[in-house]
Image (cartoon, rainbow, N blue to C red):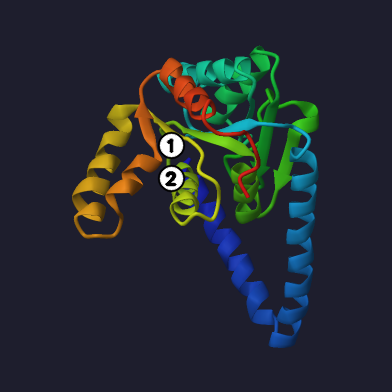
């Protein structure tokens, strides 16, 4: 699979470079204008469709997690229990942890949202997304805005670069007060403890974060604790869009 991905990526890059070499600056400006309109259309459609759904929790994790993996089973239970607590579930729409979360939401007869990203490999919508809540995005940054604006919490299970990207985005926006504070829950202390140690031993000691920044997230190991953290948070604060 790795070799196939590298071959596809090289072909895509060669094609992109060939196109860019054929353009002059005037053509590039014209292309950029259409780019802005495409981005705007994704924002408009995303906001229109998600605004009607109500309070949701975004769940992240690896697309490569198999159904028999304990993390898959855990993600499904977390989504199921959150749905029973009144939240819709938003995922990246793909397989693995995302599929598990959508499956849990659907099993509880709740709202199951998928924000799918068009990729040349790996990603396609899973079958547990509600038909009217399956959104397709070309641009990662538009998709990330949708994840955050309509989420009342982030639940982050073990994952790769994409999962870390979403986690970092949320923590940065909360830290800089660009969005309202909401609960960020990391599930799996064995998986996340090394990252937490690095935050404490490197980021904090180097003065690149404050001690209070370590309070922007919680680490739990069970579905019950994940759901309790979110419910406890909203016993104090109102449910509302984040920005």
**Of the numbered discs in the image, which one, if any, rests on residue 40?**
none
Question: Residue 201, percent across and down?
Answer: 19, 49
Closer to the camera in the image, 157 or 17 = 157
Number of labelled discs? 2
Question: Residue 222, percent across and down?
Answer: 40, 18
Q: What residue is rendered at 65% in x and 42% in y? A: 241
Closer to the camera in the image, 74 or 27 = 74
User: Circle 2 — which element?
Assistant: helix
User: Circle 1 — which element?
Assistant: loop
Q: Does 16 appear above or below 96?
A: below
Q: What residue is rendered at 79% in x and 40% in y? A: 49
Residue pointed to by mark 1: 159
Closer to the camera in the image, 56 or 194 = 56
Closer to the camera in the image, 26 or 167 = 167
Q: Does 98 appear above or below 4?
A: above
Mark 2 or mark 1: whose residue is earlier in sequence = 1
Residue density around tag 2, few if under 14, some if 14–19, many if 20 or more, within 10 Å: some
Q: Does 72 appear above or below 218?
A: above
Disc 2 to disc 1: CB gap under 8 Å = yes
Cα distance in 3D space between marks 2 and 1: 7 Å
- Left or right of residue 200: residue 214: right
- The quadrant in which residue 13 appears is bottom right
**Of the numbered discs in the image, which one, if any, rests on residue 164?**
2
Asked whether the viewer can see residue 120, the reply is no
Residue density around tag 1, few if under 14, some if 14–19, many if 20 or more, within 10 Å: some
Asked whether the viewer can see residue 194, the reply is yes
- Left or right of residue 100: residue 69: left
């Amino acid at each position: 699979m790795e070799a196939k991905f590298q071959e596809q990526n090289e072909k895509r890059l060669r094609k992109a470079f060939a196109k860019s070499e054929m353009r002059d600056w005037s053509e590039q400006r014209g292309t950029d204008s259409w780019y802005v309109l495409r981005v705007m259309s994704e924002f408009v459609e995303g906001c229109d469709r998600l605004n009607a759904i109500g309070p949701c929790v975004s769940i992240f994790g690896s697309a490569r997690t198999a159904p028999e993996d304990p993390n898959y089973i855990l993600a499904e239970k977390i989504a199921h229990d959150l749905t029973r607590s009144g939240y819709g579930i938003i995922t990246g729409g793909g397989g693995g942890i995302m599929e598990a979360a959508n499956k849990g939401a659907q099993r509880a007869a709740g709202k199951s949202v998928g924000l799918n990203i068009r990729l040349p490999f790996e990603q396609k919508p899973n079958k547990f997304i509600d038909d009217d809540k399956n959104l397709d995005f070309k641009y990662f940054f538009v998709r990330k805005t949708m994840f955050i604006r309509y989420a009342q919490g982030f639940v982050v299970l073990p994952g790769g670069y994409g999962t870390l990207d979403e986690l970092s985005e949320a923590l940065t926006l909360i830290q800089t007060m660009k969005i309202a504070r909401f609960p960020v829950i990391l599930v799996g202390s064995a998986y996340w403890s090394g990252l937490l140690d690095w935050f404490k031993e490197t980021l904090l000691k180097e003065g690149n974060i404050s001690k209070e920044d370590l309070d922007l997230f919680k680490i739990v190991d069970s579905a019950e604790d994940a759901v309790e953290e979110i419910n406890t948070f909203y016993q104090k604060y109102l449910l509302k869009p984040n920005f």
